[in-house]
Amino acid sequence: MHFLYGSTYPSWKPVFLLNACVLTVCILFNIFIPKVGTIIRYCGAVSGLAFVFTLPCITYMKALHEKKQLTAYNAAIHIFIMILGVCNFISQFLMHAK
């Protein structure tokens, strides 16, 4: 809201419109994908890939690289962790929920 209106709470109309849009998107997802577990599974896999496996490893390796302390062994371990995250992400599309 601050980006669009210059205030975190501009008035009740834009806040109401935002809430109505979010509610509409949620209802449409519920209509077309009624199994909420499927949505949570995919969102969790994407979030896990980004926030648990990839970003911490990349940030740590970048910090080590700037200090000139990044070794091949260190890089290999962190790349392996990121590969595990990619495997976890891909496995969500191979599983069949019953």
Image: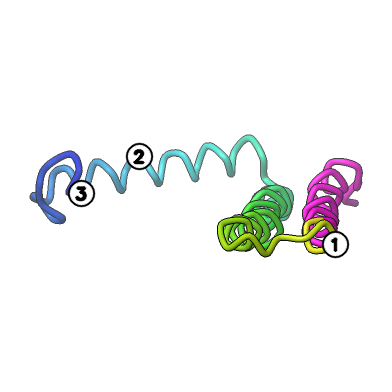
> What is the distance, in whole Å, between disc 1 and disc 3 at their CAs?
51 Å
Sequence order check, earlier mark of 1 and 3: 3
Question: Could you say where residue 83 lies in the image, as x and y percent from the top left?
Answer: 83, 50
Is residue 96 on the magenta stretch? yes
Residue at numbered disc 2: 21
Main SS of the magenta segment? Answer: helix
Using the image, tell me which numbered label, if any, was put on residue 54.
Answer: none
Q: Residue 35 in the image: state x and y as whole percent.
A: 71, 49
Q: Tag 3's secondary structure?
A: helix
N-terminal label among 2 and 3 = 3
The residue to which callout 1 is attached is 73
The amino acid pointed to by label 1 is: Tyr
Q: Secondary structure at mark 2?
A: helix
Residue 78 is inside the magenta segment: yes
- C-alpha gap between disc 2 and disc 3: 10 Å
Q: Are marks 2 and 3 in contact (CB under 8 Å)?
A: no
98 to the left or right of 10 = right
Identified at 8% across, 50% down, the residue is: 11
Disc 1 to disc 2, C-alpha distance = 49 Å
What amino acid does circle 3 point to?
Answer: Val
Hey, which quadrant is residue 5 in on the image? top left
Question: Could you say which is closer to the camera, residue 22 or residue 49?
Answer: 49
- Residue topped by disc 3: 15
